[in-house]
Image (spheres, coloured by chain):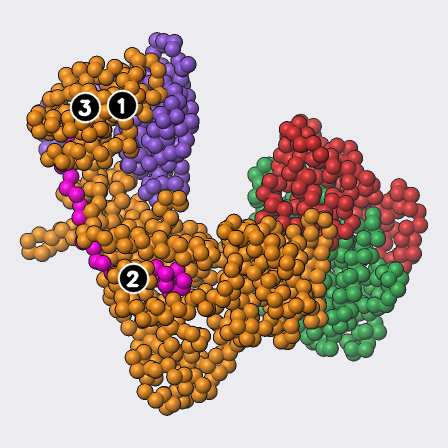
Amino acid sequence: MSRIGVFICHCGENISRTVDVERVAAQVGTLPGVAFSTDYKYMCSDPGQGLLKKAIQEQRLSHVVVAACSPRMHEKTFRKAVESAGLNPFLCEMANIREHCSWVHEDREEATQKAIEIVGMMVERVKKNRVLPTITVPVTKRSLVIGGGIAGIQAALDIADCGHEVVLVEREPSIGGHMAQLSETFPTLDCSQCIMTPKMVDVANHPKIKLYTYAEIEHVEGYIGNFQVTVRKKARSVDEDKCTGCGVCMTKCPQKKIPNTFDRNLGMRPAIYVPFPQAVPNTPVIDRENCTKFKTGKCGVCQKVCGPGAVDYEQEDQLIVEPVGAIVVATGFDLYSIEEKPKGSPIKGYGEFGHGKIPDVIDGMTFERLASASGPTGGKILRPSDGREPKQIVFIQCVGSRAREKGISYCSKICCMYTAKHTMLYHHKVHDGQAYVFFMDARTPGKSYDEFWRRSIEEEEAVYIRGMVSRLYQKGDKIVVMGSDIAVGVQVEIEADMVVLATAVQPQKGADTLAQKLGISYDKYHFYSEAHAKLRPVECATAGIYLAGACQGPKDIPDTVSQASAAAAKVMTLFAKDKLEREPIVAKVREAGCVGCFYCRKVCPYGAVEEKEIRDRQGNLIKVVAYVNPGVCGGCGTCQATCPSKSVELDGYTDEQIVAMIESL
Amino acid sequence: MHHTEKHNFEPKIIAFVCTWCTYAGADLAGTSRMQYPANVRVLKFPCTGRIDPVFILKAFQQGADGVLVSGCHPGDCHYIAGNFHARRRFAAFRKLLEFVGVDLGRLQFSWVSAAEGGKWVEMVTDLTERVRGMGPMQEFRELALEEQWSGAIDTPELREAYNSI
Amino acid sequence: MTPKKTLNYAYYPGCSLHASAGEYDLSTRELFKKLNIGLTEVPDWFCCGATPAHNVDELLSLSLCAKNLELAEQVEGDLAVACAACFSRLKTTQHVLSESDVKRRQVEKAIDAPVPLTGNVKHLLDILARDLGLEQLEQAVTKPLAGLKVACYYGCLLTRPTDVPNLDCVEAPTIMEDILKAAGAETVAWSHRMECCGANFTLSRPGVVIQLSHAILDSAKEAGADCIMVACPLCHGNLDIRQKEIEGVYNTEYAMPVFYITQLVGLATGLGADKLGLDALIVNPMPLLKEKQLL
Amino acid sequence: MLLSTETMDVDFVRKVEALSGTSVRRCFQCGKCSAGCPMATFMEHPPNRVVRLLQLGQWQRILAGRSIWYCASCETCSTRCPNKVHLASIMDALRKLSWDAEGPSKESYVQLANRLFLQNIRTYGRQYEMRLAAVFNVKSGQFLKDLMLGPKLISKGKLKMFHQKNKNMIEIEKIFGRIEEMRKNGEAL
């Protein structure tokens, strides 16, 4: 028989003004199983808690109901108090007679009656409460960071500086990401490479960072604190330990006509290459698709000229398993292209802008490469078609972004600012040139952002035209831009030498497949979903996985770096403990009843349901049942409501407890 | 200023709510000192996904005259997608209930976020008034008796038949 | 040269082909005969309402087209349409009525019959390039149009808007060029191939037509075209019939013959000038055709 | 312009939306329609402004002007609108509603041509270009318009002197009749 103690709080006068607390205490005291009931002015105060603890010990109470404010307010407080008095904290429940009763009713009689019923309901519930042991899982204090752009670099450095080992995996041959491609950055116009490359070197030299470049995530298993990640290290064809980075192989490679993707195909690179001179690691990779040796078997020049003998044509992909406790996803973004898309694709291209076939219509990133001092033109703004300096340049914003017709409805956030920056860079480099910008609205929220945009108009003399462009076409060596100025209400035609499109920010290619490997959710554009838009913006709903940078949504550099550091802080919070404690509100499977239909697995938002084989003593398989991994379970209980045989139960919210409450009414 | 008049019939309303949105919304109604009829009893669940339709039947059986089910707005679920499963489940369940002959006016599904104290008050008030107008719920009390009858295996014939299966 | 499969179509010529665009009708029938493609004219078809009807009365426009679609059901085969405007209206009707139940019910009431929404409506271009196929077409060519530089003019209604006619890419179609290349001609890249000629205003505001068509003719000339090719009687009316007038207003000279697609393809398959109605063209094509030794 | 719930005619906007099957509110005024419109130079309100006025419920200002009658129905705006606003259909709806409101527009020639075109269909079932042109010239008082084209066209066989009458003429009349009936009964807009 249970010995329940009920404690009714006055909350000063907040409750007692409308609820007759003495009567509630008296009435509830008569309920079967209630051994003790009392009321007190402030239950949450020190003396109140003292009263509670004393009663538990003196009255040998088995369960406790505190009738006071909302459990959202003080459930933790009272459960802690109960625990310190030697009871399992989950044997304490709160009855909400303030927010749900005294504050919302005026009639004293009605309110008192309701309070009695509410407390009665919780008394019946608490009788069915079970002792729940706190769940602990061990934590592997190593972390995986996926993506070596500025987000991944920042997160990796923060975590490693805290003393924890980091495995950084980058798909490209070098870390650096998009930021390494940029010329100068808004709103301060500092050189991107100057601030980026030191950080890249820090990563390379950090004793706590294990760097895998030219590598991808193959497979992820496990759960928070205990992931097993398989990394595929693609064959580089160059031994990283032997290579000294002298670069002779690159200069001697006879195949030099491969478009350089890092330079947005503006320049050429050899088949054995580093993407850019400041690459980290400074170890070349052989592009096997374009290498003569791999295509025809003849050549082998690089191997012959390599002093240390690092070139290895026989090298194969390697699979490496890394145990980690937390994962930071920082896969970044990709740029939308206006090219014709395959039939049936949800994203469409821009036929009205020539489907990318007009050579002097380029995108913003290509302009960055033109403007970059280390770019293919040495920082000169020159047309790709004939290498002439464009005297009239047109920038068009919102290309792809905010265009539901093309399949993308969102704002890409960074284009207004980088276009303003482009007009400035252009004006600095081509003094007699004129920049025009077609835009809808300038979105410049951010410190010093609007001032920056205004400067491009007021001081750098960019002409901003509020209106969009209907069509671009080549006419001789000019590009005719057919736009409109909606402020004046006229059509505007500009014969431009070059057109720069501010194309939309999209998630990295393959973002969806990586998400499926990780078991994290993503939106219809394949941006990764955070657990809560406001309060948990860097965590995934899947425990132990965190987001940093543009893989979660379009972001500029300051936002990306902030989020990366935030994700790192989350990882460090996790690593601060040796064992992971979590609320034991998790689902458990009653194996005897489970028929293995796995409906629970279909509805589980966390992927917490696994298969478990039940065998007899001889080892013969009897049946396969569901098993809920307590480390992964989020505790929503959807499985329980779905289970046809009622064989899964959510601790803390069992059918028994709920039916007891309903029956009390 | 809320109802001081007494009614002949005070319906019993049971609300099944999720802890993250609607329970918090009801809390907000309290902290904002809004007033609503005292007929509702709130049962807290982690998520609407946990709410088994059987609970609704059970509530009616236990003498509830109206039942309210409310959780996070679609897409806002704390547990990613629990409320989507709930929505599907209840869409089917409503049909079933209608088929059985329950007036669907007694059952309300809705979404109330943690910021919607006003909506909570409005909904509870509307449902209470509506159910008050409909009178006490009779159907399921009889059903409860029936269930007990069919549940018991208290004759030797029945026992034999039961054992042979 | 017989096609491997037998192709038969219901044929909706539209009002213009029975009047000002008689040569389009003639050349279509002759070309299809030559290619062994069957055409059976839909009996007692009505005007599709063209632009003026949908301009002021969508319900009437939809009803007229729906009635024609219903009439076309009497004849076996997909519905072949020559005029870009008729094609656009019939396709739009199918699109709108399959999207909106309200409008479909209204139209069904107006024509007192169910609307066939699934029948295929095909422009001649589609039939030549896809049903017959470019390979077959190429095989049928006996007198390739070698050396003839053609500006293919699509106009508005063959491809626009997105997802309605679904004939080709809305912004960068190639179907006309593909057909002409199969016929051995050279096509030019030019900027105004999809700009509007202002057909709707040919009666009420000829000034508009002159201005818009002038830009088109200019662009074709600048691109070095010998002639323009169209697949719409309304475009033809503006570019061919009004060409002299435009030359007068802008004090310029084009002498740019404007052919129907069936005339040029017909020439390539060896049909004679009389069977193609070349004499009905206002801008005399004979000097050009003789110069290129195509006649 | 004074804006209030009284001066913004939302009902009219709803009618436009019902007729056109497209949202008016969705337009975010990027101006791409006006940029590509071949007729924008002839309009006093460029296309984007027509939608803007509609968003503000100011239909009188639209119908009083020429803009809607100078739309060529070329569908360029609808095709390129980033927001899937079917502006060409909105234009159709506005012209229809203009006729319902007894056509308060300044532009009469385009309207006249449209009227005659529809009359032709009702009378003959098909277009009869010679009559269309002749009646238009008489009614618009431009007796000599396109006079030079006539003989040439006749000699080329392009203007038929006799119209083709359709055997199913009763059907056409019935369609017109039923539509009028439906409108009278409020079954269609």
Residue A607, image x and y in percent? 28, 50
The hue in which chain A appears in the rendered picture of the protein = orange
Could you say which disc has been placed on residue A161 in the image?
2
Q: CA distance from mark 3 to mark 2?
A: 49 Å
Q: Label 2 neighbourhood size at 10 Å, few (<14), some (14-19), many (20+)? A: some
Image point 30% across, 59% down: which residue? Answer: A159
Q: Is residue A552 left or right of residue D1?
A: left
Image point 52% across, 58% down: which residue? Answer: A187
Q: Which residue is mark 3?
A: A7
Image point 38% across, 9% down: which residue? Answer: B5
Q: Chain of mark 2?
A: A
As for residue C60 lying within the magenta part, the answer is no
Is residue A125 something one can see in this rendering? no
Q: Quadrant of residue A160?
A: bottom left
Q: Say what secondary structure mark 3 lies in.
A: strand
Answer with mark 1 or mark 2, whichever residue precedes in sequence: 1
Q: Label 3 neighbourhood size at 10 Å, few (<14), some (14-19), many (20+)? A: many
Residue C91, image x and y in percent? 63, 50
Q: Which residues are magenta?
A: A128-155
**Whether label 3 touches label 1, CB < 8 Å:** no
Q: Nearer the viewer, residue A76 or D83?
A: A76
Q: Is residue A394 left or right of residue B114?
A: right
Q: Which chain appears red? A: D
Image point 56% across, 60% down: which residue? Answer: A421
Q: Which residue is mark 1?
A: A11
Disc tally is 3
The hue in which chain B appears in the rendered picture of the protein = purple
Circle 2: residue type: Asp
